[in-house]
Image: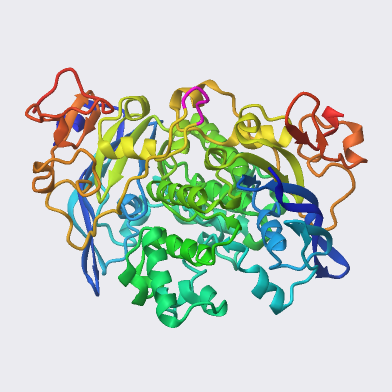
C-alpha cells in the first residue's frame, strides 16, 4: 500500500509570551497508508488534537512537512489552499454541541462545503444533502431543522455528513465519540466503519478511549507530551505494550470484566502529565517512569524500529 | 416492598430507598425523571448505579441529598431511610445534619464544583466548622491532614492555594478530602472520574478504595462506564428511563445478565479479550421521552426481544437468585421465547 499521508518531523510550538514556548507537537513523524485507520491515543494535553489540526493546516506548522500523495502541503495555509484541500482532507470534531452553528439549518451546515465547490446547482446541492442525511442515518426532511433539535448522536451524524459530503480521501476524527453514550458510540463507530469501506477513506482516529481505539484502528500510535512514544499494530500494541508509558496507560484502562479487574494489580501511575512549556532535555516520560535510567534524563530517545516486531518505540530500554 | 429488598435487609443495611419518584415541571410539560426506584446500600460496600445520560441516576442521589431544586423539582413518592431515619423532604437547614455530615458527595466536574474565590483549605475546613463545631484554626489544620489522606503532595502549601492552581485530578482529590472530612457513613460519587484521563482515573479509583478500607464507608458510585463498575462495585443497579431494570452483585450483572438492556450495553462496548473478537452491536434508537413515559417497559422500543405485552404493561421484578433481579417479561413463566444470550434462573416464574 502506498502512503497517502507522510508526516515528517512535524512540529507546532505555541508562543506563550515571556519567552516561553509550549511544545504542543514536537517532531512527530508518521505515515498513513491508503485506506488505513491510525488511532492516536494519549492523555489530555499530550498534543493529539493539535497534531490532527496541524496536519490539516488548521494550525500553521512551526517546522516539518506534511506530504499528501507526494505533494508537500504549504507551511501556512492561505484561503485558496483551504479551498483546494478541503475536498481531499476533512475533519470531524469532538463536541457535537459546539461544532455546529446554531443559527444555520442542518441543510445549510451540510451543504456549505459543496456550495463553496460549485459544480452543482441549488437543486443538485439539495439532492446531494438529502442523500447524505439518509446515508448517515437521518431523514431528508431534517434539512430544515436546527442543530438544537437533535440529540448528541444525531448531531455527530450531521458533523459526519458535513465532513464527508465532499468525498474526501483523508479524514481526521478528533474524539468523535467521547461526548456520546455507550449505546450511541457503537452506532457512530459502525457508521464510520461502513462509510470508510464504501468510500475508501483513510482515517486518523484521535480518542482517549483505548478499547475503542483498539477496536477501530489498524495501527495505534501513543503520544506523550507532544512526542510519539510508540506505534504499532493496534492489537499487538494493546496486548503487548513495549514503552513503559503505553504499559501504564493500558494498565489503567478499566475493563468491563469484574474477574479480570479483581485479578490484576493496580497500575496507577504516580504524578500527572507535566507542563509542555519549556520541556527539559531527555525522555519526556522520565519524571514518571518506573524504569528510568540515568541516560533517560539526558538524551531524548529517538523512535526506533524494534528488531523482530512491527513496532516503533522511543525508549532507551530498547536500544 | 419487593422480595429482593427484603432478602438483603439485615443489620448492615445503611440506607434503604423505596419507590422513589421525582418529577420536574418544565415549559414542555412534566418530566418524570425517576419513576419508582428501590435499592439498599450496605455498610462498607460499593453500589454502582449505571445508565446513560438522562436515565435518572444523578437525580436519584441528588434527591437523597436534598439537592433537587424545588420547584421545579418534586419528590412525588417514596422514602429513603438512613439507619431507619427518613432523609427525604428535609428543608435546607434541617437537612444539614445529613448532608455533608452523614452522607458526603463528590461531583463530576471538580473545576466548577469548588468555589474559585476560596482557598482549598478553607473549603475543606468549612464542613468541619458547620457540622462539628471546630474552630477555624483547628478545622484548617484538619484540612491539611485530610489533603494528606487524599495523597496530595505538599498538603500544607496546597491548602492555602486556590482551585485554579490545581489540576483536574488534584481538584478531585481535594473534593474527596472535603467529602470525607466529617467521616460520613456513605460517600456518593457522581461520575467522579468522567472528566479525567484514564491514568488519573486509576489514581482516583485507587484512592477511593483505600479510603473505603480505612474508614469503612459505603460508596454509591454513579457512572456510565462499565469498566469502572467492574473495577469498583460490589453491587450494581442498571438504570434505564427512570427505573432500575436489573440489580445484583457485580458478577451477576456482568456474567449472568438477565435484562436485554444490560446485555445491549455489553455488546455495544469493545471487548478486550483477545480470544474473542466481536463486532460492536449498537442499541438502535434512543431512550424514550420521559415527558410521556411508555406504558410498559421503558426499553421496549429498542429491545430486540420485545413482545406485545412489553409495550403495554410494566414488568415487575423477576428474582433470579437472592438480590439479583431483572425487570423483564421474558422471565415470566409464560414467555415463549427465551433468548440464549440472556441468563434465566433455574427456578423460573412469577414469584
Tell me the quadrant of the picture where the N terminus of chain A can be found.
top right
Q: Residue furthest left?
A: B334
Residue shown at the point (37%, 69%) measured from the top left: A130
Question: Relative to the observer, which residue lies in front, A135 or B291?
Answer: A135
Q: Relative to B74, does residue A76 appear above or below in the rendering?
A: below
Q: Relative to A186, does residue B126 appear above or below in the rendering?
A: below
Picture quadrant where residue B288 is located: bottom left
Q: Relative to B109, does residue B337 appear above or below in the rendering?
A: above
Rendering coords of residue A101 (x, y %) = 48, 76
Tell me the quadrant of the picture where the C terminus of chain A can be found.
top right
Number of numbered callouts drawn = 0
Rendering coords of residue B111 (x, y %) = 56, 60
- Check if residue B274 falls in the magenta segment: yes
Residue B83 appears anywhere in the view: no
Answer with left or right where residue A25 lies relative to residue B285: right
- Check if residue B24 falls in the magenta segment: no
Name the colour scheme.
rainbow
Residue A281 appears anywhere in the view: yes
Question: Relative to the observer, which residue lies in front, A274 or B16?
Answer: A274
Rendering coords of residue A243 (x, y %) = 74, 33
Rendering coords of residue B192 (x, y %) = 49, 47
Answer with left or right where residue A310 lies relative to residue B101: right
Residue shown at the point (84%, 53%) measured from the top left: A279
What range is drawn magenta here? Answer: B272-276
Q: Residue furthest top?
A: B346
Residue shown at the point (72%, 62%) measured from the top left: A54
Question: Relative to the observer, which residue lies in front, B321 or B93?
Answer: B321
Q: Provide the major secondary structure of the magenta segment.
A: loop
Question: Relative to the observer, which residue lies in front, A100 or B17?
Answer: A100
Answer with left or right where residue B22 lies relative to residue B139: left
Amino acid at each position: 500500500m502506498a502512503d497517502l499521508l507522510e508526516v515528517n518531523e512535524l512540529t507546532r510550538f505555541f508562543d506563550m509570551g515571556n519567552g516561553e514556548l509550549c511544545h504542543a507537537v514536537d517532531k512527530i513523524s508518521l505515515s498513513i497508508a491508503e485506506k488505513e485507520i491510525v488511532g492516536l491515543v494519549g492523555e489530555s494535553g499530550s498534543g493529539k488534537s493539535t497534531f490532527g489540526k496541524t496536519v490539516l493546516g488548521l494550525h500553521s506548522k512551526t517546522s516539518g512537512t506534511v506530504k499528501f500523495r507526494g505533494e508537500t502541503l504549504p507551511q501556512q495555509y492561505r484561503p485558496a489552499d483551504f479551498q483546494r484541500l478541503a475536498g481531499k482532507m476533512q475533519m470531524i470534531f469532538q463536541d457535537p454541541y459546539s461544532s455546529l452553528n446554531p443559527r444555520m439549518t442542518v441543510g445549510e451546515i451540510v451543504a456549505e462545503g459543496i456550495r463553496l465547490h460549485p459544480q452543482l446547482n441549488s437543486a443538485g446541492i439539495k439532492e446531494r444533502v438529502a442523500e447524505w442525511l439518509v446515508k448517515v442515518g437521518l431523514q431528508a426532511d431534517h434539512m430544515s431543522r436546527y442543530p438544537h433539535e437533535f440529540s448528541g448522536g444525531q448531531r455527530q451524524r450531521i458533523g459526519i455528513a458535513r465532513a464527508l459530503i465532499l468525498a474526501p480521501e483523508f479524514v481526521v476524527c478528533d474524539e468523535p465519540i467521547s461526548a456520546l453514550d455507550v449505546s450511541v458510540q457503537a452506532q457512530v463507530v459502525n457508521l464510520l466503519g461502513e462509510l470508510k469501506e464504501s468510500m475508501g477513506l483513510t482515517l486518523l482516529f484521535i480518542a482517549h478511549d483505548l478499547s475503542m481505539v483498539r477496536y477501530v484502528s489498524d495501527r495505534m500510535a501513543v503520544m506523550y507530551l507532544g512526542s510519539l512514544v510508540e506505534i504499532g499494530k493496534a492489537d499487538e500494541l494493546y496486548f503487548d505494550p513495549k514503552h513503559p508509558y503505553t504499559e501504564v496507560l493500558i494498565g489503567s484502562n478499566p475493563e468491563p470484566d469484574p474477574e479480570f479487574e479483581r485479578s490484576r494489580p493496580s497500575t496507577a501511575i504516580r504524578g500527572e502529565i507535566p507542563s509542555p512549556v519549556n520541556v527539559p532535555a531527555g525522555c519526556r516520560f522520565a519524571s514518571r517512569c518506573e524504569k528510568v535510567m540515568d541516560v533517560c534524563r539526558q538524551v531524548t530517545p529517538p523512535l526506533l524500529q524494534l528488531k523482530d516486531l512491527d513496532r516503533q518505540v522511543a525508549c532507551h530500554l530498547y536500544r | 416492598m419487593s422480595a429482593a429488598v427484603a432478602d438483603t435487609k439485615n443489620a448492615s443495611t445503611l440506607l434503604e430507598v423505596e419507590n422513589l419518584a421525582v418529577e420536574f415541571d418544565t415549559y414542555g410539560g412534566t418530566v418524570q425523571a425517576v419513576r419508582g426506584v428501590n435499592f439498599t446500600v450496605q455498610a462498607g460496600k460499593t453500589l454502582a448505579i449505571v445508565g446513560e445520560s438522562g436515565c435518572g441516576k444523578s437525580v436519584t442521589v441528588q434527591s437523597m441529598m436534598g439537592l433537587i431544586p424545588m420547584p421545579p423539582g418534586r419528590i412525588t413518592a417514596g422514602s429513603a431511610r438512613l439507619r431507619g431515619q427518613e432523609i427525604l423532604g428535609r428543608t435546607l437547614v434541617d437537612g444539614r445534619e445529613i448532608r455533608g455530615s452523614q452522607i458526603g458527595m463528590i461531583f463530576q466536574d471538580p473545576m466548577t464544583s469548588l468555589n474559585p474565590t476560596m482557598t482549598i483549605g478553607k473549603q475543606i475546613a468549612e464542613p468541619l466548622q458547620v457540622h462539628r463545631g471546630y474552630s477555624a484554626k483547628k478545622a484548617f489544620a484538619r484540612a491539611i491532614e485530610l489533603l494528606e489522606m487524599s495523597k496530595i503532595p505538599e498538603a500544607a502549601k496546597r491548602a492555602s492555594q486556590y482551585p485554579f492552581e490545581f489540576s483536574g485530578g488534584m481538584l478531585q482529590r481535594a473534593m474527596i478530602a472535603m467529602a470525607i472530612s466529617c467521616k460520613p457513613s456513605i460517600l456518593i460519587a457522581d461520575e467522579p472520574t468522567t472528566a479525567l484521563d484514564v491514568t488519573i482515573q486509576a489514581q482516583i479509583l485507587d484512592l477511593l478504595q483505600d479510603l473505603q478500607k480505612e474508614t469503612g464507608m459505603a460508596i454509591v458510585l454513579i457512572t456510565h462506564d462499565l469498566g469502572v463498575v467492574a473495577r469498583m462495585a460490589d453491587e450494581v443497579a442498571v438504570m434505564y428511563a427512570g427505573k432500575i431494570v436489573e440489580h445484583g452483585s457485580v458478577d451477576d450483572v456482568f456474567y449472568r445478565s438477565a435484562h436485554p438492556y444490560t446485555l445491549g450495553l455489553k455488546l455495544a462496548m469493545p471487548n478486550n479479550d483477545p480470544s474473542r473478537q466481536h463486532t460492536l452491536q449498537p442499541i438502535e434508537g434512543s431512550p424514550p421521552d420521559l415527558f410521556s413515559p411508555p406504558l410498559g417497559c421503558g426499553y421496549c422500543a429498542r429491545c430486540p426481544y420485545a413482545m406485545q405485552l412489553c409495550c403495554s404493561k410494566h414488568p415487575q421484578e423477576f428474582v433470579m437468585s437472592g438480590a439479583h433481579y431483572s425487570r423483564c417479561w421474558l422471565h415470566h413463566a409464560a414467555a415463549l421465547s427465551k433468548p440464549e444470550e440472556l441468563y434465566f434462573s433455574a427456578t423460573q416464574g412469577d414469584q
